[in-house]
Image (cartoon, rainbow, N blue to C red):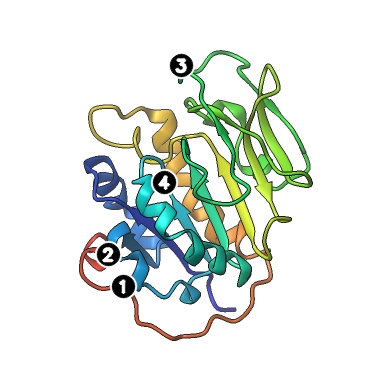
């Protein structure tokens, strides 16, 4: 069986560049796509796309239609961090101060979902705010007060959207690194490619474009 192809957007930030140089990325990422190269990138060659925290919201808003087309082609998108503008339909974020993790600060929802076989609340360092999921979305994790910090939306498009206020890259390497975030990052990519995408039927991708070149390709070298 052909292995699922996972790509990751990045804005060229130092923390992103350090994270994308980790060996797990060479093993599990098919491409790292510079955000400014996204409009000329054929996303149909990928099964999944990671959108990490901290990317330019105006650029994401300009690419909204492209990303919705990817989702409607049965693609899977993983969206991380705060989203102060509603650049993607159905994603509504609420601000909250991002504090350090506390004991029992998160609650598991939908315990039968495969995410919970791989990750526990202790694998979350901290979150930036919460979300108001659309009706019919599956909530996977909440704060103690019920605010949603992780959900999966399979109702808004023909694809699948996993949304969380967790940071993916900012705390992996560099000045703000911590072992919790590093462990999550190194385990998340293999789980996505080997399990989450593998269990999801996607339509055959049309090979219209080539693998991203320039900055996108250099990030994986």
Residue 214 % position (x, y): 20, 69
Q: Which residue lies furthest to the top in this view?
A: 103
Residue 216 % position (x, y): 27, 64
Secondary element at image label 2: helix
The answer to the question of whether label 3 and label 4 lie on touching residues, with beta carbons closer than 8 A, is no
Residue 40 % position (x, y): 34, 73
Q: Which residue is more in the foreground, 74 or 199?
A: 74
Which of pointers 3 and 4 lies earlier in the amino acid sequence?
4
Alpha carbon distance from label 3 to label 1: 37 Å
Residue 180 higher or lower than 154, as above or below: above
Dot 4 alpha-carbon crowd within 10 angstroms: few under 14, some 14 to 19, many 20 or more: many
Mark 3 sits on what residue?
99
Mark 2 sits on what residue?
216
Alpha carbon distance from label 4 to label 2: 15 Å
The answer to the question of whether label 3 and label 1 lie on touching residues, with beta carbons closer than 8 A, is no
Which of pointers 2 and 3 lies earlier in the amino acid sequence?
3
Q: Which residue is more in the foreground, 142 or 103?
A: 142
Alpha carbon distance from label 2 to label 3: 33 Å
Alpha carbon distance from label 3 to label 4: 19 Å
Dot 1 alpha-carbon crowd within 10 angstroms: few under 14, some 14 to 19, many 20 or more: many
Quick one: quadrant of the N terminus?
A: bottom right
Which of pointers 4 and 1 lies earlier in the amino acid sequence?
4
Dot 3 alpha-carbon crowd within 10 angstroms: few under 14, some 14 to 19, many 20 or more: few
Mark 1 sits on what residue?
212
The answer to the question of whether label 1 and label 2 lie on touching residues, with beta carbons closer than 8 A, is yes
Which of pointers 3 and 1 lies earlier in the amino acid sequence?
3
Secondary element at image label 1: loop
Secondary element at image label 3: loop
Residue at (54% x, 68% y) in the render: 70
Mark 4 sits on what residue?
52
């Amino acid at each position: 069986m052909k292995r699922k192809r996972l790509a990751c957007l990045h804005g060229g930030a130092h923390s992103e560049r350090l994270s994308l140089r980790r060996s797990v990325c060479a093993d599990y990422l098919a491409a790292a796509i510079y955000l400014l190269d996204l409009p000329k990138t054929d996303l149909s060659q990928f099964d999944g796309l990671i959108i990490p925290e901290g990317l330019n919201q105006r650029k994401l808003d300009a690419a909204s239609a492209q990303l919705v087309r990817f989702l409607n082609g049965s693609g899977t998108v993983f969206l991380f961090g705060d989203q102060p503008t509603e650049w993607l339909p159905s994603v509504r974020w609420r601000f909250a101060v991002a504090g350090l993790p506390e004991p029992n600060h998160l609650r598991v929802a939908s315990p039968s979902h495969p995410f919970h076989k791989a990750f526990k609340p202790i694998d979350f360092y901290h979150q930036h705010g919460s979300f108001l999921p659309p009706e019919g979305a599956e909530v996977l994790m909440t704060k103690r007060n019920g605010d949603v910090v992780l959900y999966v939306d399979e109702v808004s498009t023909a694809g699948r959207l996993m949304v969380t206020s967790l940071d993916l890259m900012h705390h992996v390497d560099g000045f703000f690194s911590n072992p919790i975030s590093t462990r999550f990052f190194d385990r998340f990519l293999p789980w996505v490619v080997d399990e989450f995408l593998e269990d999801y039927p996607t339509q055959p991708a049309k090979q219209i474009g080539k693998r991203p070149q320039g900055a996108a390709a250099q990030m994986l070298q």
